[in-house]
Image (tube, rainbow, N blue to C red):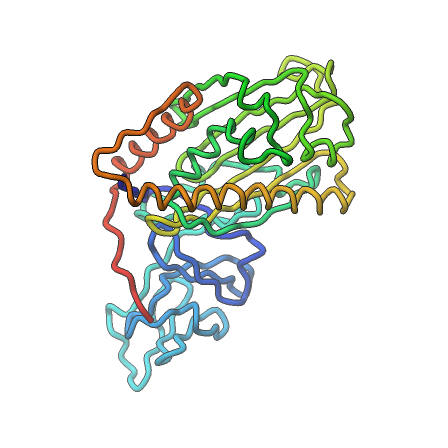
């Protein structure tokens, strides 16, 4: 199974809080990038390799807004142009590093990997809860030693909650309840929904909301290929009507956000965030949700890391089996394939050693 990247797309590179006047090196879709903020607070993203002897610029230093290579002193401005070289006045015409378009939105730093001429910030999908004063958010990021497509499959088929996440978010009814899948071809979104009535309340929600007894529980997923996954989760005591046409003001709303960013062909940045509209000032609830969701994420990481080793060793021509619960994941795979085909599935650059 070959993994490739849709290159003319936006990817989450970091949380806004990670990017500062210190240098942050991160690999996105096989490309090493250094991130920092200019003196006025604007995020900057440049290729993380000096043109001279390929030293990592993330291991270097800032001089004002300029980035000074820590090996021989080649100095670059925020556009990637070299403005000073050691021992000579003339700056070679080719002395510049790639600049990547970046946008800060909804607490994320987004980076464009492909052709800068077609980078349109208006196409970045939104996760407004993460930056809203009306919601309280906990978040984190875990490294995944597996291809990003495995995480997409995982998140679009939540039946695994029953088996992998029992004691946290999984109950028997999740796997037992059929899903509905819709694909918006015009806007490039996959929707997967699972609506459960009169079901067990998992500890994740019982301990955070204080609900006692059984609940009605809705999971409505939006996947915006290639990077952003949104889970609109609603829970309420049995009898409270959930739905767009009903009054669900007594429901508890949780927005679960994942940014699924490829690092290399077989590694992924697994950004996660949980926003809630209840107990917003309760630090105890925040601590519980942060710890619980990180545990769930790490359970997924362990499972997918194992799965990556299985796939890497599978014989040529192996055919996997898919069933009804896989319809969302299969639709996502097709959309990703279309994005890759349409956006130059460019050859990854050679690995650079500093």
Seen in the picture, residue 328 relative to 168 is either above or below; the reply is above
- Which quadrant: the C terminus? bottom left
Q: Is residue 272 left or right of residue 49?
A: right
Direction from residue 197 to residue 213 in the image, left or right? right
Residue 293 found in image quarter: top right
Single out the residue that lies furthest toward the bottom. Answer: 87
Viewer-nearest residue: 117 or 19: 19
The location of residue 72, given as percent across then percent down, is 35, 80
Q: Percent from the top left, x then y, of residue 49?
A: 34, 67
Q: How many numbered discs?
A: 0
Q: Is residue 180 left or right of residue 33?
A: right
Q: Nearer the viewer, residue 305 or 142?
A: 305
Residue 277, quarter of picture: top right
Could you say where residue 326 lies in the image, as x and y percent from the top left?
A: 41, 24
Residue 260 visible, this orientation? yes
What residue do we see at 54% from left, 19% from top?
176
**Picture quarter containing residue 321?**
top left
Quadrant in the picture for the N terminus = top left
- Asked if 53 appears above or below 124 in the picture, the reply is below
The answer to whether residue 351 is above or below residue 283 is: below
Q: Position of residue 234 (x, y in %)?
A: 65, 25
Q: From this viewpoint, which residue is outermost toward the left? A: 316
Check the image and report above or below for 147 versus 336.
Answer: below
Residue appearing at x 52%, y 40% in the figure: 258
**Which of the pair 199/86 is nearer the observer?**
199
Looking at the picture, tell me which residue is in the foreground, 332 or 43.
332
Residue 249 can be seen in this image: no
């Amino acid at each position: 199974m070959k993994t490739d990247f849709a290159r003319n797309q936006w990817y989450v590179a970091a949380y806004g809080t990670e990017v500062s006047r210190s240098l942050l090196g991160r690999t996105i879709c096989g490309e090493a990038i250094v991130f920092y903020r200019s003196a006025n607070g604007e995020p900057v993203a440049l290729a993380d390799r000096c043109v001279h002897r390929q030293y990592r610029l993330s291991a270097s230093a800032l001089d004002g807004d300029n980035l000074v290579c820590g090996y021989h002193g080649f100095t670059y401005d925020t556009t990637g142009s070299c403005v000073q070289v050691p021992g000579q006045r003339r700056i070679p015409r080719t002395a510049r590093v790639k600049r990547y378009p970046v946008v800060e939105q909804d607490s994320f730093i987004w980076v464009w990997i492909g052709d800068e001429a077609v980078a349109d910030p208006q196409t970045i999908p939104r996760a407004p809860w993460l930056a809203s004063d009306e919601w309280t958010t906990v978040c984190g990021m875990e490294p995944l030693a597996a291809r990003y497509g495995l995480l997409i499959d995982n998140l679009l088929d939540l039946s695994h909650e029953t088996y992998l996440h029992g004691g946290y978010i999984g109950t028997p009814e999740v796997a037992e309840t059929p899903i509905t899948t819709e694909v918006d071809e015009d806007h490039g979104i996959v929707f997967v929904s699972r609506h459960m009535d009169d079901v067990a309340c998992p500890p994740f929600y019982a301990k955070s909301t204080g609900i006692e007894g059984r609940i009605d529980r809705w999971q409505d997923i939006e996947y915006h290929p290639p990077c952003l996954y949104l889970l609109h989760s609603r829970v309420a005591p049995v009898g409270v009507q959930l739905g767009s046409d009903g009054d669900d003001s007594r429901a508890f709303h949780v927005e679960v956000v994942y940014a699924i960013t490829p690092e290399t062909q077989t590694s992924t940045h697994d950004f996660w965030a949980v926003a809630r509209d209840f107990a917003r000032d309760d630090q105890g609830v925040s601590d519980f949700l942060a710890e619980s969701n990180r545990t769930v994420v790490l359970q997924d990481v362990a499972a997918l890391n194992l799965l990556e080793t299985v796939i890497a060793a599978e014989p040529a021509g192996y055919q996997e089996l898919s069933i009804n619960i896989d319809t969302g994941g299969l639709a996502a795979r097709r959309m990703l394939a279309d994005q890759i085909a349409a956006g130059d599935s460019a050859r990854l650059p050679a690995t650079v050693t500093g």
